[in-house]
Amino acid sequence: MVLSLSVFVSASDNYLVEQNVSSLNFISSSTNQECLISGNSCTKHIATYDVSGEGLDSVEVWVSVYQNDITSSEFTEAVEMLAEEGNFEFGRGSPNNNNILAAELEYGDGLEYDDGLKDQYLFWHDNNKIIGIIIDDWDISVITNDDPFEELRDVYLNKYPSELTFIEPDQYLIQEDIGDLSFISSSTNQECLISGNSCTKHLATYDVLSGGLDMAEVWVSVYQNDITSEEFTEGVTKLADNSGFELGRGNRRNNNILSVELEYGDGLEYDDGLKDQYIFWHDKNKVIGVIIDDWSIEEITNDDTFEDLLDAYLNKYPSELTFIEEAEDEPEEPETSCSDTDGGKDYFTKGLLNYTNEEGENFESYDVCTNNSVLVENFCGPNSVMYTCPDICLDGACLNRTVVKPNITEGPEEIEDFNRYYCFGCLVEKSCYPLGYIKDGKYCFDENKTFIEQKKPESFCENNFECDSNLCINNQCVSGSLWAKFIRWLSSIFG
């Protein structure tokens, strides 16, 4: 039963709807100074409506007008406090008519009415006003139609559209049921674990057993700057010291490293520790905490409940924690280091891989072309991969240009745009000469793509164009005059 000390007002109250709403009969209005938000004076305007027509079941509407505008944080904090004082379950708001209702507070003797019990409180805020619609001890054997409450709510939502933004979907949290855990509510504050790095902490609350008796909480603190493992561990250590917890060493799970496990209690075992358990880790600029507090192990017998919540957030935020204090009798793991100047697998940039192994030995390796098309690309691991370039491989990188490859028959080709085209031959000014092309006693050499002098007789050769006589026989340059004498001799024999 809702009790309030009110002063009857006979004049019309503009803040209220002083008329019948559908099957609800307007009865009376009053005001008082009972404010939900402390430190902000208000006048509460109250309207009473009869549901059954006999005055046995009534609905109250509160429109509390404050001196100053109300933030969603102030509003939600006040409603949570009201729920605690009234021994209510604090429920998460739901959307209706494109407005967001703040909270649904329910209690009673188990008789179901509407989407809850027969006692139901809904609140939202609009600028400097808090609106509350309250049903109390409705007799569901008499009131069988749930429309009256819905219609009254919609009338006041149209008069006072909700400005509540606090419970809009929070991208940092999982705002849905997880396994046996029912999502209840979310909130934010600025309580930061890491000093000197501003943050916003996003909190999600989950109910383990219906009735709100056993809760689990998740923190996702989003910091302005990325967090190192050293900063993270220092912050968690302070939290453990200040709270009187034992700081436990992290353990591995799902290939992620959990940072600490803080436990205390009366010795009752639950999950992989005591019934109070705190686990933290960090991911880039975020610190994640999964917390259970005073769980009743007599009622919660399934140890997967906490594990499901833990895994859900580990999948959303893989741990980046690399610093874990080692046990005294455990040797330090050797450190390795690796760097790649082209940032990894960049086939179009020549890179230098620098790797130091566990023994402290240092190795360097450049990306290299094995031939005109195949690249050996090195990257940290350390690893390497063979890659076939789309056009050509040159000096440890694929060229991102069109290759001009002239042939001996057609001769040189002109290149106007060197940013778009690459000469696979000897480039003289803007002319691209084919490999093996002879010009002014020189030929286009394939190894360095430049013109070099033709070879003298008796020099080693592989192609005719390498010799000044244009004769390469049995890998040796032959004199033109000697070859002419040989031809004349053959002619004399065979006529």
Image (spheres, grey):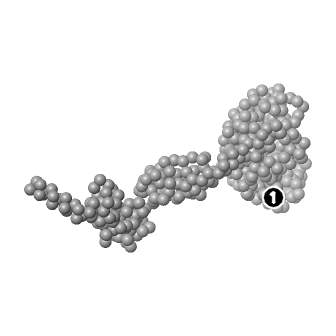
| Residue type pointed to by label 1 | Gly
Q: In the visual, does 487 lie left or right of 79?
A: left
In-front residue for pair 346/433: 433
Q: Does residue 449 appear anywhere in the picture?
A: yes
Residue, disc 1: 196
Q: How many labels does the image show?
A: 1
Indicate whether 201 appears above or below 140.
below
In-front residue for pair 248/445: 445
| SS at circle 1 | loop
Q: Where is residue 43 in the image (x, y as percent from the top left)?
A: 85, 56
Residue at (57% x, 50% y) in the render: 379
Q: How crowded is mark 1: few (under 14 residues within 10 Å), some or many (20 or more)?
A: few
Quarter of the image where one finds residue 477: bottom left
Residue at (62% x, 51% y) in the render: 363
Q: In the visual, does 342 lie left or right of 491?
A: right
Residue at (79% x, 34% y) in the render: 211
Q: Position of residue 19 (x, y in %)?
A: 74, 50
Query: Dividing the image into 4 quarters, which one contains the C terminus?
Result: bottom left
